[in-house]
Image (tube, grey):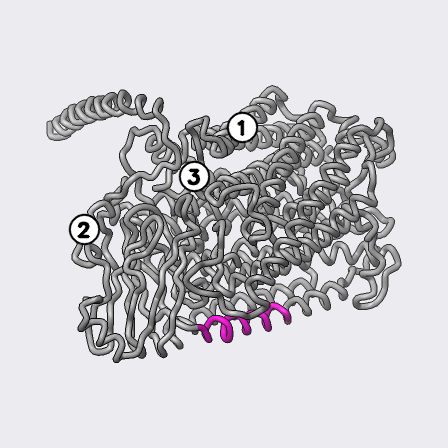
Amino acid sequence: MHIHAYEKIWLAFAIVLILLLLGSVTYGAVGPGVAMVADSEAQIDANALDEDDRFAEPRVEQVGENEYEAYVVAYQFGFEPSPIVVPENSTVTFQITSRDVIHGFEVAGTNANTMAVPGEVAEITVEVSEPREYGIVCNEYCGAGHHAMEGKLHVVSEEEFAEMNEGGENE
Amino acid sequence: MSDALEAEETFLDRFPEEAKVVRSAFLGSFLALTLGAIFGIIQTLHRTGLFRGLIDSTDYYTVLTAHGVFLVISFTVFFLVGLFTWAVVRSLDRPLVDIRITWTWYVLMAGGMTMTGISILAGFTDAIDMSADVLYTFYAPLQAHPLFYTGLAVFIVGSWLAGADWFRTWLAWREDNPDERIPLQTFMVLTTMIMWYIASSAVAASVLIFLLPWSLGLIESVNPTLTRTLFWFFGHPVVYFWLMPAYLLWYTVLPSIAGGRLFSDPLARVVFVLFLLLSTPVGIHHQYLDPGIAEGFKFISMTNTMFLLLPSLLTAFTVVASVEYGARQRGGTGIFGWLRSLPWRDPAFTGMMLAGLMFAAGGFSGMVNAGMNINYMIHNTIWVPGHFHLTVGTAVALTFMAATYWLWPQITNKPVYSRQIGLFQVVLWFIGMALMSNAMHAQGLLGVPRRTAEPEYSGFDYPVAFGGFEELNVQIAIGGTLLFLSTVLFIGNLVLTMGNPRVSGLAETIRPALSGPDDAPEVLDDLRIWVGIAVTLVVLAYALPLAAIINDGGLLGPGVGTYPVWIDATVGALAEVAVPAAWALVDALAFLGARLLDAATSGVVA
Amino acid sequence: MSRTETAGAPADDAGGDEEFDPVGTLALIAVYFAILVIAWVYIYYIEFLGRDLVVVG
């Protein structure tokens, strides 16, 4: 088959480009350690979330030194708990599910972003630093009130976090 | 046939019956474009907050569903069936085998789309207990009225018959021409349709096995991850289904309009084969952020997706080289100076070139969408609609409009009413889209979500970068308004064209390639091989993920409710009767099956 | 006989034996390649990896 020399050059460049893209994504995975939402958690009965010890009471729980788990339920049209309160400089693992339709869970302007699918549990781990308030939006259409669905993520100082837990607001 | 004679005869003169089909398909397409544009402008102004007086925010999703379905299903596919009918008949130089079959698929597709359209538009009125506010992705467990799914199924079956019609015509041609290469345009149509058969089988299965029975109350629940995966099995190749007619025009029509020739026929064939092979085993890249799908499957999907860049990058070279050849023929010189020697006053040429330029820009945001982990940054933000308004919204839509200025006279014998308005219209589209799409990408990086009536929230403000949120909203609204005006000019120009008297001498020729089909290996034309490889790749990419999803969550889901966006008393009553009847049937079949199995085992034992 | 983008190369403008070298295309596409690479490096390494809340597990 006859291919013009210039087109062969371009073909080579195109393959280099593809390898650059695949290489970057691989670097992101092994260098900074970006991990994908995957099938790490088992399926769950979305109609019986009250029988699950994580989602019966959506909450933030300390699971290790500086390690926290946030059990989040998305529903038409909001998130529980709201706000999600975590202490500064900690590692937070979100476990997110939906009790009705498909929702999104996006901490606006950051990389924390996942689908919340009924019957599935999405797990993502992030590291938070200084105290800051983030907005959480549902980024998948979920019904007529979709635009009103928002939540909050509050990263607070350690003192404030300890105070809140003593007050029993956030068990 | 001599060239002189060929130049005098238009498609309408030579194939009047087929020309009527092409016209009808285009008219259906442009009706959908008109509706889609009206919903588009309402949506743009509402979402950006510039004017929210026309609809309530709760009705925004009816508008959005209509905008999506009418434009990406109806406008694109009706144009495709018209164009493909023209391309097959023209390049084989013979009529369709049986025009009654042709009208049958046309009526099925039009009927199916009408049903789906009614179910969507009924969402605007409370008087009819029907709605389909599920957007064009119809993710379960949001549930539309059964008419929505039924219409889609009928539409898809119609498109299958259309493909069969073109295959049959090609086979009839093959009998008379046993040793000839498949003409390039027909080759493009056939490979695209094979891709379509493979891709649409999944959405047809999803609709017929799960969604339609579920909306009728015959099954209680569905597995949302499964129906979503089946949707994207179809949902990515469908973007190439929109794009392939544009590619067909860029490869076979654009070079001639530019006064050039296609640079390489063999590479055009290679590109279409690559699309056939790689379009489908990539759908999981729309589900990078889905729980319930292993990372390895996502990685495989990404690798396939990245290699899918290859045919598009090759196309960029081949098409630009073909146009450059035209410019050189017209006396163009220099490294970049030849660009001045092109027929920029021709709306068909300028429209297609601007569409191609936008596609090159869309290539960049597409690379980002395809990158597995970078998806965290832009997934479901307005970046994504920003991307596909460059691809389907410009590369495809603007090419179709531009091609109409070239093709419409040949299927009607009526000259275009005003080529100046046409030229202004395509440039206006380009400017409008440049504004709108650029601002959408920028808002996406701020984290602004897609698919929402009111992207501003009470609890937080977006960061300021690339221009603030409000400023970008204004850009989106201005861009959207220009796009709407451009559509009005296009439709208006076309309506006035219809009022023109019929004349002769409007025929256009397509000139042969510089490197013709004889340079292409014969194996490229052996479609059976490519079908085999395409199916194998799809099985490799999807068998394990689908098995895992069904194994983990069950065919009908791990326990998920039903959330109809409509409530219908008559269907409810029907379901009360139908469900017990269906279970009785299942019981009977199970009993029969058990007896047969018994008989078989005893037979084996004996 | 089918029509004709498949016909043999006619003599009028095919350039005879000399092959057409699309040097302008090569230049344009080289510019495109450079833009793609620069834009990608920016969006991946600065915009994406520089963001808050990188998902690490």
Chain at numbered mark 1: B
Instruction: Read off the residue under disc 2.
Output: A50
Letter of the chain that mark 3 sits on in the rendering? B
Give the crowd class for mark 2: few <14, some 14-19, many >=20 residues within 10 Å: some
Q: Residues within 10 Å of mark 1 (few under 14, many from 20)?
A: some
Q: Are marks 3 and 2 on the same chain?
A: no
Quadrant position of the N terminus of chain B in the picture? top right
Task: Tell me the SS state at disc 2.
Answer: helix
Could you say which is closer to the camera, residue A65 or residue B255?
A: A65
Q: Is A29 included in the stretch rendered in magenta?
A: no
Q: Circle 3 sits on which residue?
A: B203
Parent chain of label 2: A
Dominant SS in magenta: helix
Res. B114 mark:
1
Residue B583 location (% of width, % of height): 22, 25
Above or below for A165 versus B435: below
Q: Earlier in the sequence, mark 1 or mark 3?
A: 1
